[in-house]
Image: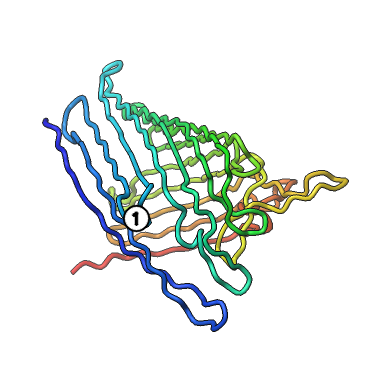
Amino acid sequence: AKAGLTAFLSHKINQYELMAVDSGRRNSYTEQELYAGGELAKRQGRFLRYNATGEIGVAGKAIGQFRLNGDIDLNFHLWHDTVTFTGRASVTNTLPSFYIRNYHSTHFWWDDANQEKEFRSRIEGELNVEHWKTNLRAGVENIKNYTYFNAEATPTQHEGNIQVMSAVLNQNFRLGVFHLDNEVSWQKSSNVDVLPLPDLSLYHNFYIETKLAKNVLSLQLGADVRYFTKYKALTYTPAIQQFHLQAQTEGEEGDSRVEIGNYPIINLYANLHLKRTRIFVMMYHVNEGMIGDSNYFLVPHFPINQRLLKLGLSWNFYD
């Protein structure tokens, strides 16, 4: 199949509103962006497919901004199975969003902040073996002028570079009616004080899937578990609806920041599907109170729900 080349222009007009300093009225702000770009793609082919897109800002707030993305798919045979390898790369240089640069409220206020463009470069590879139900993805990203919310819940930028490495393995197993789906994620930040991440995250789902009543009723019974290792996670401020760094003070007991993690969340569930009707029953967080360290937080100071029974019914109506 032949490749195709496309050129384009895009013009964005964005309008925002902010509270005025004295009157309490809302002032309107307009930003315009004009980009020129192109795409080279080969979307059909038995062994090779690729896509490359790029755009650069030529007017308005877009000046100095650009985005480059590319990916390539290779299909080959390995031990009588088809294996797909996908390589991806991206380079972007973009301004933080308007409300990261400007924000007005009763308790939080900033103007013309964080004007440096955030430069990101990433390379990633993905291997997929359909017959084995295996998918492995790994990549590394470098971020310069990383924009984040500090311990005062105001946005700021990190002047240096931060590297993030990651790898994700999805491996599913099946034996008759028994299924076991697994996802293992590993990630590493070069600066955990600015960009904290858990080293390891796990998801496992064990279930039985079968059909009953002369193959009319579909039944799924199972349990899933989610887990991640301890780390000093971002906390949350509802007033600006943003996650931000925890406040850090050094005392006799050391670092005051709260660590979360190292706690599994286990759910039991049943799904039934009969013609147009779906029914589900879930006992959420079934292990609540059964583990000595009841540190069940996904965000510091915001605990997840205790043991909870959920019921659901879905009925599809057709004309």
Name the spot of residue 120 as percent of width and height, x first: 45, 40
Name the spot of residue 150 as percent of width and height, x first: 63, 53
Name the spot of residue 266 as percent of width and height, x first: 58, 47
Q: Relative to the observer, which residue lies in front, 113 or 280? A: 113
Crowding at mark 1 (Cα within 10 Å: few <14, some 14-19, many 20+): some
> Which residue occupies the extreme bottom position in the image?
23
> Which residue occupies the extreme right position in the image?
252
Give above or below for 277 relative to 41. below
Q: Quadrant for the C terminus, please.
A: bottom left
Q: What residue type is labelled 1?
A: His
Tell me what residue is drawn at x 45 percent, y 36 percent.
180
Give the secondary structure at mark 1: strand
Tell me what residue is drawn at x 28 percent, y 48 percent.
215
> Which residue occupies the extreme left position in the image?
2
Give above or below for 294 relative to 278. above
- 18 left or right of 238 in image: left
Give above or below for 187 relative to 55. above
- 20 left or right of 73 in image: right
Name the spot of residue 275 as percent of width and height, x first: 27, 58
| Residue indicated by mark 1 | 273
Q: Relative to the observer, which residue lies in front, 318 or 169? A: 169
Give above or below for 169 relative to 101. above
- 15 left or right of 23 in image: left
Tell me what residue is drawn at x 30 percent, y 15 percent.
79
The type of colouring in the image is: rainbow
Q: Relative to the observer, which residue lies in front, 273 or 67? A: 67
